[in-house]
């Protein structure tokens, strides 16, 4: 995993940069845009954490020097470093993770592996198969969709696995990922500053 993400421009897109939000117990709860994060910091709802874990309110964060790797927001009298992690001072909830049924999440659940033959040909050569075919009333659900390679998908056709003489490697189910795992999977390039909080959750 990269140690830090270098912005393409020091200020361009800085307000859309991702910021990890922690609840009052320092557990990750979500990722917000830098725009929202800076509002929370300015209003005193959250404090910023630097890479060493030091805590800053807005007035003290404003005085921090800009580093080469930082995203920055231009100000009338200078620049403001975009924080990577914010600690919400009063928020104490642990939000339930809602995992969207999607091709990407099904590939993650099934570890990019055909659930019939066990091969891993690559994402482009994997299909989603309805265990009970749609033509037979099969639903779009976690329990009825599996990853399959093209050859197994064609071999099974509009039959059930039993009818096709094909056994599933595992019973399809809705995954139960932690909030930290969900954030890691959603983030393309998690920042180095996020790692201690995501690993601890």
Image (tube, rainbow, N blue to C red):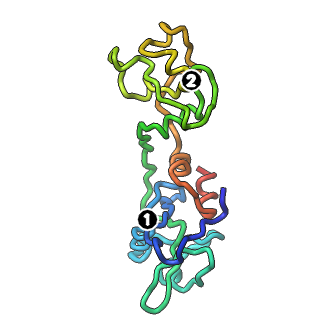
Instruction: Determine the residue positioned at 48% across, 59% down.
Output: 23
* Most foreground residue, 6 or 195: 6
**In the depicted structure, whether residue 148 falls above or below residue 108:** above
Which residue is at the front of the view, 83 or 103? 103
Q: Is residue 57 above or below residue 4?
A: below
Where's residue 137, x and y in %?
Answer: 32, 17
Q: CA distance from mark 2 to mark 1?
A: 37 Å
- Residue at the spot 50% in from the left edge and 50% down from the top edge: 186
| Point 52% across, 28% down: residue | 147
Residue 92 percent across, percent down from the top left: 44, 56
Q: Quadrant of residue 32?
A: bottom left
Mark 2 residue crowding within 10 angstroms, few (<14) / some (14–19) / many (20+): many
- Is 153 or 118 nearer to us in this picture? 153
Q: Is residue 196 left or right of residue 78?
A: right
Q: Is residue 123 left or right of residue 41?
A: right
- Residue 191 has which mark? none
Question: Which of the two discs, 2 and 1, labels the residue nearer the N terminus?
Answer: 1
- The kind of secondary structure element at disc 1 is strand
Number of numbered discs overlaid on the protein picture? 2
- Please, what secondary structure does the residue beneath circle 2 have? loop
Q: Do the residues bearing badges 2 and 1 touch, measured as CB atoms within 8 Å? A: no
Quadrant the N terminus occupies: bottom right
Q: Residues within 10 Å of mark 1 (few under 14, many from 20)?
A: some
- Percent across and percent down for residue 75 are 44, 86
Q: At x 46% / y 37%, what residue is drawn?
A: 103
Toward the bottom, the furthest residue is 77
Q: Nearer the viewer, mark 2 or mark 1?
A: 2
Relative to 184, say whether 159 is above or below.
above
| Residue at image mark 1 | 33
Q: In the rendered image, which residue does mark 2 sit on?
A: 115
Q: Position of residue 45 (x, y in %)?
A: 41, 70
């Amino acid at each position: 995993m990269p140690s830090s993400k270098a912005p393409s421009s020091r200020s361009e897109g800085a307000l859309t940069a991702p910021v990890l939000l922690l609840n009052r117990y320092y557990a990750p709860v979500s990722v917000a845009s830098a725009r929202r994060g800076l509002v929370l910091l300015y209003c005193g709802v959250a404090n910023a954490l630097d890479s060493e874990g030091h805590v800053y309110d807005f007035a003290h964060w404003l005085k921090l020097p800009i580093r080469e790797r930082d995203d920055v927001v231009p100000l009338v009298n200078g620049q403001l470093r975009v924080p990577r992690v914010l600690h919400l001072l009063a928020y104490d909830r642990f939000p339930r993770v809602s995992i969207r049924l999607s091709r990407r999440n099904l590939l993650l659940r099934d570890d990019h592996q055909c659930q019939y033959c066990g091969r891993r040909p690559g994402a482009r050569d994997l299909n989603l198969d309805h265990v009970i075919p749609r033509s037979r009333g099969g639903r779009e659900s976690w329990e009825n969709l599996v990853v399959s390679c093209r050859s197994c998908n064609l071999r099974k056709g509009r039959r059930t696995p039993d009818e096709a003489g094909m056994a599933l490697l595992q019973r399809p189910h809705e995954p139960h990922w932690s909030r930290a795992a969900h954030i890691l999977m959603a983030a393309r390039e998690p920042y180095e500053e996020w790692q201690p909080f995501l690993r601890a959750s």
